[in-house]
Image (cartoon, rainbow, N blue to C red):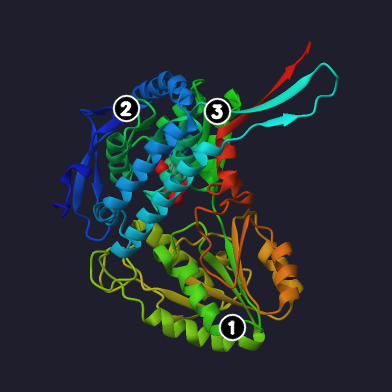
């Protein structure tokens, strides 16, 4: 199928290595999850190609690091401007390959672009430090230097923003970059590279290598000594594989891994606001984000009212092709995602939960799933432990604040958590007690380029966005200067 693009050149199918568009005799298909149609076939880079891209990034790193922060900032700013200018086309490519509703895709493009804007600004402010010396004839100066070549592996759920959040700080501080986008969604990454080239990013600084061989390419990125750092967003399972593969070369790592976010509604909450927050935290991107509310704990006094109101809002969601008017909920990414959602619902129902909304596949067929609300959910069910990554809101009932904190923290994950309360003392108590890198208090939407995104426990290492976001891409070096 042909996409309706104002600038058809944004639909690129070659890899981008060392400033050149590289075709391959091997290609792999990219399908539209809403209808199964083939969108394009994309160059399939292998391990040797990966090594070439790493060589290109390695060769480019010295010159790029020598650019002033202001010079790098100008290029990133131009890239940001081009992404905003082409947001409609980028959203069209994104919806086609990933399925999310077009307005949401456009929102992701602007969100991704906001990181490029932010780090363009930060590029000029990578300050070192001067430390009072420990001896009279000594001076101590701290330099911040780019780590070098960064290898990136990203998932399909935010095909643009997950790359933007990584490449923007990396390039801003003077690193060079090899991106391996998810095999389901390489077109958004390649479109970013088209605009990066137009913005004037020098050859070798930003490389994109689509590949169907995730483990082969991943291993090369992890093992190659020219790569200084791996930045990964994806499952905890794969994050562990990458971490062990990186141990041979002691690579730096940033990991944004799985979550299992609790969403707590206390009796003193504004229930309507909590329902709106839950709609965003649960059903945005069809439940396919790592910060999605996975376990919704509602205090006994408001449980029934919350369940009723949530059901009413969920029944108003409009499922369909992401290009359709008014569609709020696209398809799930693939059949495996459908199976997991069905399995979690069946397991909960077998153990006593009730489906009060949705509960099964949509009559639209394909990978469309009816947004679901479950009541009577208990901690022995799979939904209490595993990330569902789909449109299922399981409502647990609780009585006591300490109990719900213990339940919320009873997870190996610690990415996001959310709670609703209007009691100031409780807000502080609970916010401090929750074991997660991010806490939404009376809000269901926490993602922004100005704040540090990241997890604790097995949800990952490092932070993306904000003034902290450059640190992941910098080494600290100090000079001890004597004989003064
Ligand atoms: P998700 O469920 O979000 O797809 P995954 O962790 O499975 O999470 O995938 C995230 C990214 O990691 C994808 O681009 C995928 O292709 C890639 N990937 C999967 N397995 C490996 C591996 N063994 N080595 C490197 N990358 C991998």
Residue ID for mark 2: 17
Q: Which residue is mark 3?
A: 147
Q: Which mark is residue 448?
A: none
Measure the C-alpha gap from mark 1 to mark 3: 46 Å
Residue placed at 50% from the left, 77% from the top?
374
Residue projecting furthest to the top: 483
Between discs 2 and 3, the one toward the N terminus: 2
Q: Residues within 10 Å of mark 1 (few under 14, many from 20)?
A: some
> Is residue 330 in view?
yes
Disc 1 element: loop
> What count of labels does the image hold?
3
Q: How many angstroms separate mark 2 from mark 3 (CA)?
A: 20 Å
Camera-near label (2 vs 3) is 3
The image quarter in which residue 15 lies: top left
19 with respect to 450 (left or right): left
Image x and y of residue 33, in percent: 28, 57
**Among the two numbered marks 2 and 1 on one chain, the one whose residue lies closer to the N terminus:** 2
In what element is the residue under mark 3?
loop
Which residue occupies the foreground of this view, 93 or 165? Answer: 165
Residue 189 position by quadrant: top left
Structural crowding at the residue carrying mark 3, measured as other residues with C-alpha within 10 Å and reported as few (<14), some (14–19) or many (≥20):
many
* 23 to 35, vertically: above or below: above
**In this image, 326 relative to 295: left or right?**
left
Q: Which of the four quarters of the rendered structure image does ligand 1 lie in?
A: top left
Q: Is mark 1 within 8 Å of ligand 1?
A: no
């Amino acid at each position: 199928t042909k996409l309706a693009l104002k600038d058809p050149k944004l639909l690129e199918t070659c890899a981008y290595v060392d400033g050149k568009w590289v075709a391959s005799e091997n290609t792999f298909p990219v399908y539209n999850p809403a209808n199964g149609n083939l969108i394009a076939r994309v160059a399939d880079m292998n391990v040797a190609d990966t090594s070439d891209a790493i060589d290109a990034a390695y060769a480019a790193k010295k010159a790029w690091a020598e650019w002033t922060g202001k010079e790098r900032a100008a290029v990133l700013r131009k890239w940001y401007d081009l992404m905003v200018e082409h947001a409609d086309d980028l959203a069209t490519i994104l919806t086609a390959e990933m399925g999310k509703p077009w307005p949401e895709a456009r929102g992701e493009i602007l969100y991704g672009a906001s990181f490029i804007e932010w780090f363009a600004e930060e590029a000029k402010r990578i300050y070192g430090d001067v430390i009072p010396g420990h001896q009279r004839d000594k001076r101590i100066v701290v330099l911040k230097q780019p780590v070098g070549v960064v290898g990136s592996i990203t998932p399909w759920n935010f095909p643009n923003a997950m790359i933007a959040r990584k490449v923007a700080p990396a390039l801003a501080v003077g690193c060079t970059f090899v991106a391996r986008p998810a095999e389901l969604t390489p077109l958004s990454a390649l479109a970013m590279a088209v605009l990066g080239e137009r913005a004037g990013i020098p050859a070798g600084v930003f490389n994109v290598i689509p590949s169907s061989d995730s483990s082969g390419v991943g291993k090369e990125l992890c093992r190659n000594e020219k790569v200084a750092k791996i930045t990964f967003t994806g499952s905890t399972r794969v994050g562990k594989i990458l971490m062990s593969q990186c141990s041979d070369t002691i690579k730096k790592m940033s990991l944004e891994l799985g979550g299992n976010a609790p969403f707590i509604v206390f009796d003193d909450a504004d229930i309507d606001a909590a329902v709106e927050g839950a709609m965003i935290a649960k059903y945005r991107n069809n439940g396919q984000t790592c910060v999605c509310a996975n376990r919704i704990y509602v205090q006994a006094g408001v449980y029934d009212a919350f369940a009723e109101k949530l059901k009413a809002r969920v029944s108003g969601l409009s499922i369909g092709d992401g290009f359709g008017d008014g569609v709020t909920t696209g398809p799930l990414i693939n059949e495996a995602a459908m199976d997991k959602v069905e399995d979690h619902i069946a397991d909960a129902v077998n153990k006593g939960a009730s489906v009060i909304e949705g509960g099964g596949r949509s009559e639209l067929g394909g990978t469309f799933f009816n947004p679901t609300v479950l009541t009577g959910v208990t901690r022995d069910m799979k939904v209490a432990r595993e990330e569902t990554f789909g449109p299922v809101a399981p409502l647990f009932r609780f009585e006591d604040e300490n109990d719900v904190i213990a339940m919320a923290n009873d997870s190996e994950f610690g990415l996001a958590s959310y709670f609703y309360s209007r009691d100031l003392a409780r807000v502080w108590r609970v916010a401090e007690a929750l074991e997660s890198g991010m806490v939404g208090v009376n809000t269901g939407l926490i993602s922004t380029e100005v704040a540090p995104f990241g997890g604790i426990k097995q949800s990952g290492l490092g932070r993306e966005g904000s003034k902290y976001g450059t640190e992941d891409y910098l080494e600290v070096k100090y000079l001890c200067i004597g004989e003064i």
